[in-house]
Amino acid sequence: MRIKTGWLFLFVALFLAASCKSNYEKIRTSGDAELILTKAFDYYEKKNYQRALSLFDLVLNTLRGDARAEKAYYQYAYCHYNTKQYLLAAFYFKNFSNTFTNSQFREETAFMSAYSNYLLSPTFRLDQGNTKTAIEEFQLFVNLFPSSKRVEECNKLIDGLRRKLEEKAFAEGQLYYDLRQYQSAVISFDNLLRDYPESPDVERVRYLIAKSSYLLSENSVIEKKVERFTECVKRCEDFLGKYPKGSYSKEIKQLKKDAEASLKNVKQRLKS
């Protein structure tokens, strides 16, 4: 009896599913724009975003001048967002904000455009195109809506994204250092200091610049050693002037002494 009851429930469930799908397909293929739009709104309210999205796709182009266009485009953008299609969501949120400039949802959609790009931002080890786009979008939002309650959140998210770019820049400099490409390491770390002067890694970056400069000098042809050891001494002095009692100060003092000794020795060799 239990087996028969189980089969009965399964049959009913399959029948209802098939019936539901059949009704959806009938609506989708009906060619009735009014019905399709009504059901798209209905599916959205029921949080069936995939079906709502499919139906909106069929009728959005017919809504120019229609009073319901704003609602449809607003929900269409959220359909992409709620189905985790963040690239398209960012596009449609931005498009909504730029199109419906008098809408009560303009501020919200401008923020959601930026936030969708934020969700696309990958780990710092990967390409940071979406990270940079998200920062630009958040900054644009802050400029457009300086009194918004979301400004504080935007600034916090921007700080997090910028930190990711800092980590990316540091990793690139560290990679050059590990590969013994010391000149490229110095350039990369210098760029990091220029772009992120408030980075929490600044002390270590300056240490690696001084060390890379020393190793570059050591491995240079004699004709370039004078210039490069002179630059190394300058880099060491720069570090010690900023961090006289820092974690790397003892090592940098020794590097400076070694660089000065090597510089003196090279100058004597070039004179002879």
Image (cartoon, rainbow, N blue to C red):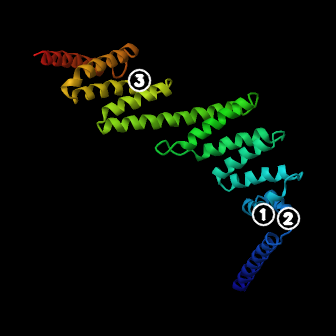
Is 29 placed left or right of 157 in the picture? right
Left or right, residue 65 beside residue 192: right
Dot 1 or dot 2: first in sequence order is 2
Local secondary structure at mark 2: helix
**Mark seen at residue 256:** none
Q: How far apart are marks 1 and 3 (CA)?
A: 58 Å
Disc 1 crowd rating (10 Å Cα; few below 14, some 14-19, many 20+) is: some
Q: What residue is rendered at 68% in x and 50% in y?
A: 89
Q: What residue type is labelled 2?
A: Ala
Judging by the rendered image, the residue that carries numbered circle 2 is: 33
- Mark closer to the observer (2, 3): 2
Residue drawn 69% across the image and 84% down it: 3
Q: Name the residue under label 1.
A: 58
Using the image, determine if residue 29 lies above or below residue 215.
below
Q: Which mark is residue 203?
A: 3
46 is higher (above) or lower (below) than 138: below
Q: Which sits earlier in the primary sequence, circle 1 or circle 3?
A: 1
| Identity, as a three-letter code, of the amino acid under mark 3 | Glu
Q: How many discs mark residues in the rendered view?
A: 3
Q: Is residue 40 visible?
A: yes
Answer whether labels 1 and 2 touch (C-beta < 8 Å).
yes
Q: How far apart are marks 1 and 2 (CA)?
A: 8 Å
Q: Quadrant of residue 121?
A: top right
Q: Give the CA distance from mark 2 to mark 3.
A: 64 Å
User: Within the image, what quadrant is residue 94 found in?
Assistant: top right
